[in-house]
Amino acid sequence: MTTHREPSRANGRMAGRLFAYAGQRPARLVAVGYAANMALGFLLLSLPISAAAPSRAIDDLFIAVSAVSTTGLVPVDPGSTYSRFGQAVILVMIQAGGLGFMTASSFAFAVLTNDAPSPLRGRVTRAVFSLPASVAPRVFVLRVVVYTAIVEAAGAGALAWLFAARGVESPLWQGVFHSVSAFCTAGFSLFATSFEAFAGDAPVLLVIAVLSILGAVGFLVASEAWDRVRGRITRLSLSTRLILAVTAIVLVLGTAVLALAEPSITAMPAGQRLLNAFFQAMTASTTVGFNAIPTAPLGAFAVTATYIMMLIGASPSGTGGGLKSTTVAVQWAFMLAVLRGRREVTLFGTAVPEGKLRQALATFFMAATLLAAAMLALSLTETLAFDRLLFEAISALGTVGLSLGVTGELSDAGKAVICLLMYAGRVGVLAFGVALAVRARGQLAGAREEDVAL
């Protein structure tokens, strides 16, 4: 007994020290957790049982990072490169990435015990889902898992039935895989050309769109909606109202500009034109990354509009990436307040706390810094056109997965840069910076203030 207990105690002490260290800054534990999931996925994809065709180690790593980060950029076709086992590994990584680090363990903890979660577990859950102080982490995690199971099961059933009616091979597996991939806004597809074969198929594209939007608007919106239906709350929070408003605005405007200005869409019949414009706007703004029309031939206007939608991204506490809809809304409100000479920043008549203003500003500049550094690196390692590299970089950082057809053409060094961007996007650009930052050892007491010219 003693010989078995000692290693266990040693491991427990080591884990305890790790958690205590990470607990000083939960973003570090989140960053380490995602990295560990990516490393495990890479090892599993490297096994012979995962292969249906030869693949290089850098491509297996790229796929693992892309799956856990729920990005969807792929240097090889997952449907033909990996066996059913390998595809299942990708699916599990997508689910783990979409639900967020520690969700599974937190769910098990909540179900198996009646104890309150530890302070560290609560802080990490708040960091992963960007939860406000009023939301209890334990209840929220339970709702996340139940909501995910219901939506993904319904989506899988609908897609399996639609695929079977269209003669798609292995419709049940295809339905399950694409339902999880859509809800987690991962954009991984077992079809070699994503959903281009379904460009005129409204039922399939609309099911994918509904799944993607439900994942992108986030678990916080779903949780509050449930409380509102049950009469537990009388008013949706500012966060939820912002998420719904920004999501609707981006979808409507994105659909309109693409339907009116993208030649490959305007050439379609009216109904198909609206459907594909909506799907393209949806796939960029939710960061799901599927495509029903070829993206490589897109015109400059559509590419620029897609840049903007990918940068704005999805919503906090959801499965998507990007700067986040609420962050962009706060930045916009701050800009308007400065232009109008107002000291107070308000949204929907509610004042935004100064701390949130600082966080939104820091997020924007952290994202800009990462993009600038990545573009400098890619300019050294690649010979591809700048606009295509920029599209790839924004897609990676926003965990979108759309590409202008250059992913497979990147050098190994270029793929490493994109992997780092996908990783930072999954952790969260601000959380990524916090995880790397060295904690200040002290404050400058009574530091002298001086005006700065801006």
Image: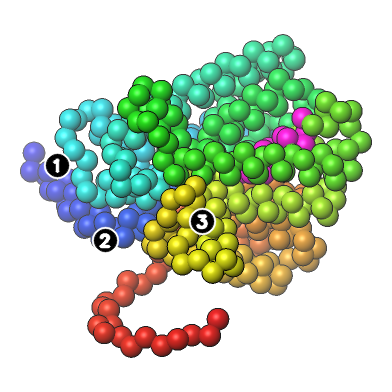
Q: Amino acid at mark 1?
A: His
Q: Amino acid at mark 2?
A: Gln
Label 2, on which residue?
24
Give whichever of discs 3 and 1 has the lower sequence position.
1
Query: Judging from the image, what secondary structure is the residue with disc 3 in?
Result: helix
Residues rendered magenta in the picture: 275-290
Label 3, on which residue?
330
For residue 133, above or below residue 290: below
Horizontally, residue 196 falls left or right of residue 78, namely right
Give whichever of discs 3 and 2 has the lower sequence position.
2
On the image, which quarter does residue 85 sit in?
top right
Horizontally, residue 338 falls left or right of residue 194, namely left
Is 193 covered by the magenta stretch? no
- For the residues carrying marks 3 and 2, which lies nearer the camera in this image? 3
Residue at 17%, 30% in the rendered image: 114
Pick whichever, 4 or 130, lies toward us. Answer: 130
Question: Can you give x and y, in whole percent of width and height, for residue 294 in the image?
Answer: 81, 40
Query: Judging from the image, what secondary structure is the residue with disc 2 in?
Result: loop
Label 1, on which residue?
4
